[in-house]
């Protein structure tokens, strides 16, 4: 296993004059990103942490730095553990001004052939564009469909209920 830290890839998609433009950045740490990009890394990282086996997730909760970065940053370990449980249950990570004032984002997992969450895709917006509730309700399903399509392209096949 590589000792290299993970690479966080974040992207922003915007429509300019009828054209869709996608900007992508990669970094070794969410701390290296400016606030406009870091929200995507935050929710992607939270999504990945929520999918860890219970023992690993508990270890992460005790080690992660929970410094306040935005008005709604989760800074308590118990609250962070509850948030990871919520993310695991909901299948979606959310950031409602936790990293920076005005920044909201959601992320969902991309699954490998074996079903593991190997990546996450996200959508980030300024709070003036949409409420957190509307973002989850109206933008979450298309994001989940996109993640399912990407997952399918890399070999993931969801379990069929019996």
Image: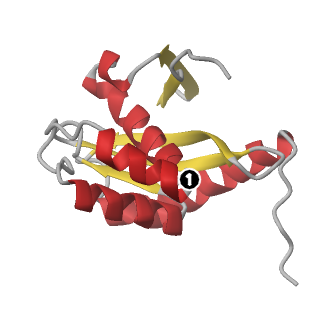
Residue 63 placement: quadrant:
top left
Residue 63 appearing in the image: yes
Q: Position of residue 97 (x, y in %)?
A: 22, 46
Q: Residue at x 75, y 42 (%)?
A: 150
Q: Position of residue 160 (x, y in %)?
A: 86, 73
Q: Residues within 10 Å of mark 1 (few under 14, many from 20)?
A: many
Q: Residue at x 16, y 51 (%)?
A: 72
Residue 50 appearing in the image: no
Q: Which residue is mark 1?
A: 51
Image quarter where the C terminus lies is bottom right
Q: Residue at x 21, y 51 (%)?
A: 74
Q: Position of residue 32 (x, y in %)?
A: 33, 16
Image quarter where the N terminus lies is top right
Left or right of 103 on screen, residue 118: right
Q: Nearer the viewer, residue 138 or 84?
A: 84
Instruction: From this view, report whether residue 119 is shown above or below residue 90.
Output: above
């Amino acid at each position: 296993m590589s000792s290299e830290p993970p690479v966080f890839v974040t992207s922003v998609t915007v429509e300019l004059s009828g054209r869709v433009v996608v900007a992508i950045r990669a970094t070794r740490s969410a701390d290296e990103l400016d606030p406009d990009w870091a929200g995507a890394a935050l929710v992607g990282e939270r999504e990945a942490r929520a999918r860890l086996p219970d023992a690993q997730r508990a270890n992460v909760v005790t080690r992660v730095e929970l410094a306040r970065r935005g008005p709604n940053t989760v800074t308590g370990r118990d609250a962070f553990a509850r948030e990871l449980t919520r993310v695991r249950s909901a299948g979606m990570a959310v950031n409602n001004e936790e990293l920076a004032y005005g920044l909201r984002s959601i992320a969902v997992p991309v699954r490998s052939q074996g079903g593991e969450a190997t990546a996450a895709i996200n959508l980030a917006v300024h709070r003036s564009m949409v409420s957190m509730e509307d973002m989850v309700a109206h933008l979450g399903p298309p994001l989940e469909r996109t993640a399912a399509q990407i997952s399918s392209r890399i070999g993931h096949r969801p379990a069929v209920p019996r």
